[in-house]
Amino acid sequence: MKAELLIAISAGIILLLGILHLIYTFFGPKLSPRDPQLIETMKRVSPVITKETTIWKCWIGFNASHSLCAILFALIYGYLAIRHADFLFASYFLLATGFGLLATLVVLGKLYWFSIPVRGISIAFACYCGALILNFT
């Protein structure tokens, strides 16, 4: 399997997770607390840093921005892998940045998230690492 394809698969997995997360952020209850009282409290209470927003608005904003960053990463790395693989694989900066981001997401996932995104990100990271191994051997 070519290294470019593995990066594209890795990016595709992250793109899918990012899109699903964005959909779940704005539609349906999947990312909402199970306790309706907690939701009401989050809608009333501001964070210590400012009274200009609420914890609920922060929750929605953080989830949406988290999704958009995953989508951006996936679109950039997928595009580079498919259309400009020579450029991507010649850039140690881009390769290290992608590696660092995916590795960090795996760690964050294991520490703070649940099994489905951890599995998806771990598979994406394994594909990315496989691409690096293929490219440099």
Image: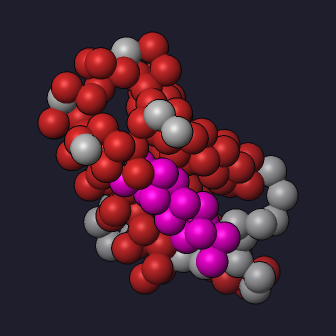
Q: Which residues are magenta?
A: 115-129
On the image, the x and y values in percent for residue 3 come to: 42, 36
Q: Quadrant of residue 116?
A: bottom right
The residue located at (30%, 18%) in the rendering is 86
What secondary structure prevails in the magenta region? helix
Position of residue 111 measured from the top left corner of the image (x, y, whole percent)? 43, 82
Residue drawn at x 31%, y 49% is 133
Residue 126 on the magenta segment: yes
Q: Residue at x 27, y 29 (%)?
A: 89
Residue 91 at least partly seen:
yes
Camera-side residue: 122 or 70?
Answer: 122
Q: Is residue 6 above or below residue 48?
A: above
Determine whether, in the image, residue 102 is placed left or right of residue 11.
left
Is 47 positioned to the left or the right of 66 in the image? left
Farthest residue toward the top?
83
In which quarter of the view is residue 135 placed? top left
